[in-house]
Image (cartoon, rainbow, N blue to C red):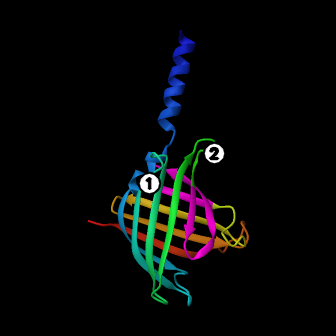
Amino acid sequence: MKQLMTIILCVIGTSALSQSIKDLDFLIGEWEVKETLYPGTERTWTENGKRTCGYYLKDRFIKCESLTVDSRNQKERAYVYFFNYDEKQECFQVTSLAHDFPLHGQHKWFLDKENKIIQAISPVNVFQDKFFRGTIDFSNPDKIVWNGWASKYIKDKEWKQVFNDVTSRKK
């Protein structure tokens, strides 16, 4: 009986710590987007627009669709993120697609619920020439800040910031 009780407590404890797509519920809604690419460099530009996030495919995924305008040429850019939780790898898998770019991105997100931050990594970027990492801060329920860095070498000491994405919840 004592062994059975120990097993039950372990199962309950493990399931209480496990994650699911519902842990990304803070993404759901309508957002205003301001993305700054290559911030602090002579190549800086912004994309402003909107993002709509909702559950997808029987609530197993979250889909975030964005429509922004490039400040350099005033052209619209449409892109989407698909999120799901991978129980085997114990992380969120994120796939990104854009209408104006033939390749898609693959990222892993590691959620820290307590500190309300996500660590994002990508083994290589879509060009397959750099490593990518990022942080997503969701400590403010009405604002999400996503910063991304890239480096040619994974052990490089000088990662360069490639974007700052700030979304504000629409009222």
Question: Which amino acid, mark 1?
Answer: Lys
**Which residue in the rendered view is the most extreme toward the top?**
1
Q: Position of residue 33 (x, y in %)?
A: 40, 72
Secondary structure state at the residue bearing disc 2: loop
Label 2 sits on residue: 89
Residue 143 place in picture, x, y as percent: 37, 65
- State the residue position of label 1: 116
Specify the principal SS of the magenta part. Answer: strand
Compared to 150, does 76 lie above or below? below
Q: Is residue 117 magenta?
A: yes
Which residue appears at 59% of the width and 71% of the height? 149
Q: From the viewer's perspective, is residue 165 above or below residue 118?
A: below
* Quadrant of the frame with the C terminus: bottom left
Mark 2 is on which residue type?
A: Gln
Residue situated in front as seen by the camera: 44 or 81: 81
Residue at the image position 48 percent from the left and 47 percent from the top: 21
In magenta, the rendered stretch is 94-121
